Amino acid sequence: MTKVLLLLNMPEQLRNRFHGYLARTFPQVAFDLADNVGKVDPYLADAEILMTHGPYLSTRSDYVLGHMPQLRWVQGTGTGMDNIIDRPSLPADVLVTNMRGAHGPQMSEAAIGSMLALARQMPRSIRNQDNHIWERWLPQIIHGKTVGILGVGVIAEALAPRCKVLGMTVVGFSSSQRVIEGFDRILPVGELKPTAPDLDFLVLLTPYSEATHHIVNEDILMALKPGSYLINLARGGVLDEAALIKVLDAGRVSGAALDVFSTEPLPPEHRFWSMENVIITCHMGGLTDDYHLQALPIIEKNLRHYLAGEGDQMINVVRKAA
Ligand code: GLV
C-alpha cells in the first residue's frame, strides 16, 4: 500500500479537511497525519510521498528528508518550496511539486489589507478601543500612492490590477522583463534601490533562495521614501530583519506588516512583538477558509497521476526526479 505522510502544521480545521478528503478519495492509500514536525518520526521509514510545506519542517528539514528511504515525491501544500528543494538531504531522485496558482486572490487581499491597515493606523484604533479612548488623526490615503512589488509571479499578477483599481501606481521588480496587465512598469531587480525613493509601499513576494537572501537589506530600506511602509508576505529570509528594526526605530520607514519571519514561530522575546509600528500576522497570508477548495484539486490530480504511473502528467512540477 502506498504510504503518504501528511505533515500539516496548519489550522486544525484545514488539516482535517485535507486529511479527510484525501482518505475518502483514495481508500487504496494509507495517510499518516502529523500536525507538527516533532511527531513525524514513526512515519518516516515507510512514507513514499510527503505532503507538507517548507516552514512546517522548521529546523528538522534535513533530518526528516534524510530519514525517508522510500521517498519518491514531495507535494508542497504551499507555493514556496524553500527548506525542501534547497536541502542537501533531499535526494536527487525525488520529484517536487508545489501549489503554484492557488494563492493570487488571498495574498492580494493580505497585501491590500496590510497597506490599508498601515496607512489608516488600524492597530492604533484597536489599542484605543481596548482603552475606550476617542482619538482622531489623519489616516493616509493609498489612492494616488506608489506600490513596488518585489517578485512578479502569479501572486503579483493578481495583486497589481487590484492595486490599480484602488488608484495606485504599480511598479514590479523582476528578474525577467515582460509586460503584464496591471503594472505601470516592471523593472529589473537591480533598479529597486534607485527606484526605492519613489515607493510609498514595498510589498515582498519573491521566493526565498540563496539569491534572494536579505535581498531587502539596509541599503534598500534606507533608500525607501521616508515615511514609507514595508509588507513582507514572502519569507523572513528575504528581508534583513535587524536592518528593518533599525530603520523603523529611526523613523525612516513608518511601519511594517510582517506575515513571515526568519524564525517561525516568531520567538516570544523578539523585538517585533513590542513594536507599535509593526503589524504581525502568523504566516497565514496564503491560507483562507476556502484553501482546501484551491489546493485539494491540485493534490488530487497529482496523486491520481502518480498512482497511475503517469508522472509526466503531474502538474506544478518544480523539480523532476533525476
Ligand atoms: C506560503 O507560504 C506559500 O509558500 O505558499
Image: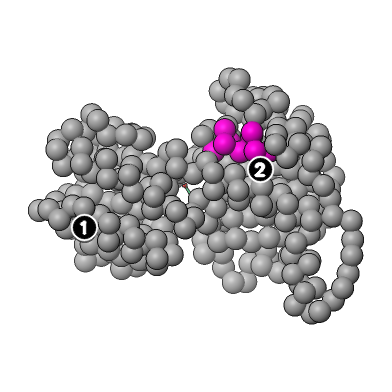
Q: Residue furthest top?
A: 178
In the image, farthest residue toward the left = 1
- Please name the residue that numbered disc 1 is placed on: 24
**Looking at the picture, which amino acid does disc 1 mark?**
Arg
Callout 2 crowding tier (Cα within 10 Å): few <14, some 14–19, many ≥20: many
Classify mark 2 as within 8 Å of ligand 1 or not, answering yes or no.
Answer: no
Q: Amino acid at mark 2?
A: Val
Q: What is the number of the mark on residue 284?
A: none
Q: Residue furthest bottom?
A: 131
Q: Is residue 150 magenta?
A: no
- Ligand 1 closer than 8 Å to the CB at disc 1? no
Residue 144, image x, y percentages: 81, 37
For the point 57% across and 36% down, the residue is: 158
Residue drawn at point x = 47 percent, y = 58 percent: 289
Q: Secondary structure at mark 2?
A: strand
Q: Which stretch appears magenta?
A: 155-163
Dot placed on the residue nearer the N-terminal end, 1 or 2: 1
Q: Picture coordinates of residue 121 (x, y %)? A: 78, 59
Does any portion of residue 216 appear in the rendered image?
A: no
SS class of the residue under badge 1? helix
